[in-house]
Image: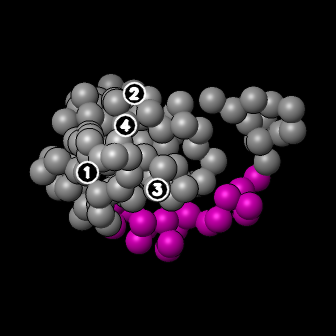
Amino acid sequence: MAAEQNHDSAACKRVDQGITRVFQLLGKRWSGPIVAVLVEQPAYFTDLRRAVPGISERMLSDRLAELGAAGLVLREVDEGPPLRVSYRLTEAGAALEPALRELAQWAKVHLPEASAWPETSLERPGRVRA
């Protein structure tokens, strides 16, 4: 072969700790889409639930709590009546907008629709997905 590469494991650079932290938080299912919705505007809990198809109330609540603990989302209670809870991005959360827009553009160009992906064991009927 003309251009065979030497794959010496010692030459492989260790993953950046910042990337690790980002994907530990935003790599969790639903976290990225929640932030993407909130980039557009603050939203009430019920509106967020409608904006992210397939997410359960419990999962939305859990993810919002995690994003809040990470300093990306603020929870605000409107005393009402009726009592309503809204969510908005903090300055740190809003700073993700350019990266999210770039990722969305990259996906349009380089990532086919999920229906075009080969079937994996996670997609087989009867298999519960995390």
Q: Helix or strand or loop: what does disc 2 sit on?
A: helix
Closer mark to the observer between disc 3 and disc 1: 3
**Would you name the residue on which mark 2 appears?**
9
Residue under numbered circle 3: 47
Residue 95 percent across, percent down from the top left? 17, 55
Left or right: 91 in relation to 10: left
Q: Amino acid at mark 4?
A: Leu
The image shows residue 92 at horizontal and vertical percentages of 15, 47
Say which residue label 1 marks: 88
Residue 2 position within the rendered picture, expressed as x and y whole percent measured from the top left: 53, 58
Q: Nearer the viewer, residue 101 or 20?
A: 101
Asked whether residue 20 is in view, the answer is no
Magenta region, residue range: 100-118
Disc with the residue nearer the chain's start (3 vs 2): 2
**As displayed, is residue 79 above or below residue 98?**
above
State which tag comes first along the sequence, 1 or 2: 2
Query: Would you name the residue on which mark 4 appears?
Result: 64
Secondary-structure class at tag 3? helix
| Numbered label attached to residue 5 | none
